[in-house]
Amino acid sequence: MKYKDEKYEKAEKGGARVLPKTVLLIVLCGLSFYLGGLYCGKNNMEVNDVAKVGSSVDVVDTTQAKSAVTFSECGSDYQDYTPCTDPRKWKKYGTHRLTFMERHCPPVFDRKQCLVPPPNGYKPPIRWPKSKNECWYRNVPYDWINTQKSNQNWLRKDGEKFIFPGGGTMFPHGVSAYVDLMTDLIPEMKDGTIRTAIDTGCGVASWGGDLLDRGILTISLAPRDNHEAQVQFALERGIPAILGIISTQRLPFPSNSFDMAHCSRCLIPWTEFGGVYLLEIHRILRPGGFWVLSGPPVNYENRWKGWDTTIEEQRSNYEKLQDLLSSMCFKLYAKKDDIAVWQKSSDNMCYNKLSNDADAYPPKCDDSLEPDSAWYTPLRPCVVVPSPKLKKTDLESTAKWPERLHTTPERISYLPGGNGGLFKRDNSKWKTRAKHYKKLLPSIGSDKIRNVMDMNTAYGGLAAALIDDPLWVMNVVSSYAANTLPVVFDRGLIGTYHDWCEAFSTYPRTYDLLHVDGLFTSESQRCEMKYVMLEMDRILRPSGYAIIRESSYFADTIATVAKGLRWSCRKEQTESESESEKLLICQKKLWYSSNETSE
């Protein structure tokens, strides 16, 4: 204590020791302020201007920024780059159950920061509805599929175009006659009862394309591959599609969503691995919904000789399939020629038997497994039983299309604050917004815009407001946001879960219009803006558009990044002329690669 007292006394008497400490404190504060300025400077981006597209342009504040953002071009061998399903990386992953074809996104240090180029000779896509039957060869330059599938009438090359005759493996003479037979077996396809469908192993999406003319909206699903590019062909035609495979993880859709599922010789081993693939179809299919199978082992009595097998083997396969379907509460609904139809039970009595039978296989899933959890969620060999709380979600109780679109879905009441009043207000809000968008971007509603993505929807309000236009909307719900995707499907719309910190499951140049509503504000703590916008550029078609509704705080920074993407943008007022929120109307330019090798 004596030492401390003496030290304090000396310091008090001798002011010379106090001065160095004061100086040191001032120096440290100054250094902290300087370093803080450097750090903040690195994280602020400058907006010098917003390029003109049209007549109405705001002057953008340049005080936030110090340098423009630029991006180099990827090599020409990246023209069909799909970051999370990249064949270049397949060797790193296992072949068991084709897990290498699932999503495997690159780590941050391996992400590309370059602009994906179009193929040489790329042209603006043929417009809908003509595009359903033809597309430019140079836009999807895959010769292998033309050679291998020409005998099945998938497509054929004719000069500068691919022509789609409407054939398929199980319907080489045309998809329309095939679907006609299907509608005879399933009358619910004719009266608006069935509105949403999923096609697993979709080929070039001819089945989904035909159903569009019948008022049924289909997601065509196929994995990324080196040769066939099935999903890219589908989207080039203007038909909804997404990259995906039933392997070890759930598909990115909520439970009880689709009214119908279809497999036309998709070669999925339905009865293997504990029946997990068929159990996944059961999960995403609405109670009372239909599963349609054509191809092995259906009609094995007449087809087995062409399948390089024996009649005994195919009979056994069919019996295993039938037993598995019965055990998960499916019943055979109709069967004719090569088509068999099963219906998922909407009667809880069947599922109660599963709960009460300890030896039942597959067993009922336990309560720890959330039915709608579908983002990197492993498949399990158990039956997801529809919640007994839901009384109006089964197909029979769901309103028929088009009344279904504006009928308040039962599942909205299970969301925080969700109710019929909120649903109606959301509808009204998006009608007003869509009307305003059309004034700012007259291409909406014309044949210039066919494939649309609402990148962070809530209830599918934009899609509902645009329902009478010649377009379709992929409604994306963040895997980190409130689970509103079931409401989207209950309305008779389609969508998917996604995390925008990663690349979307599609090929480059597949959407005509991207819509963003506060995405950068809501995800700014998780996702780096430049990677989200590079992904938007990858999936947007040349000459395509983006409508970005964002807080004024982010709008200028977004405009800077957009300029680096070679987009032209203008800033506009929202329909309410809010000072806190702005609209950016952007258009991607068509350019061709000057690089011959990859980055």
Image (tube, rainbow, N blue to C red):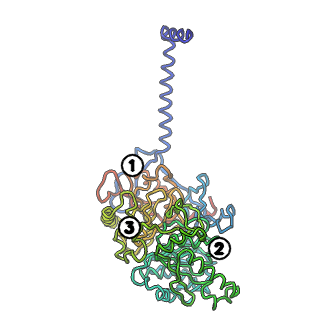
Tell me which label, 2 or 3, sits earlier in the chain.
Answer: 2
Residue under label 2, please give it.
272
Between the C-alphas of marks 2 and 3, the distance is: 35 Å
Q: Along the line of sight, which residue is nearer the eye, 461 or 350?
A: 350
Q: Which residue is pictured at 41% across the width and 77% down the height?
A: 396
Q: Along the line of sight, which residue is nearer the eye, 454 or 269?
A: 269
Q: Which residue is pictured at 38% across the width and 74% down the height?
A: 446
Q: Look at discs 2 and 1 and give the one toward the viewer.
A: 2
Q: Secondary structure at mark 3?
A: helix
Q: Residues within 10 Å of mark 2 (few under 14, many from 20)?
A: few
Quadrant of the frame with the N terminus: top right
Q: Residues within 10 Å of mark 1 (few under 14, many from 20)?
A: few
Q: Quadrant of residue 360?
A: bottom right
Q: Quadrant of residue 327?
A: bottom right
- Left or right of residue 185: residue 443: left
Between the C-alphas of marks 2 and 1, the distance is: 53 Å
From the top left corner, tell me how far across and down residue 540 is, in percent: 48, 65
Q: Secondary structure at mark 2?
A: loop
Residue under label 3, please give it.
410
Q: Residues within 10 Å of mark 3 (few under 14, many from 20)?
A: some
Quadrant of the frame with the C terminus: bottom right
Q: Amino acid at mark 2?
A: Glu
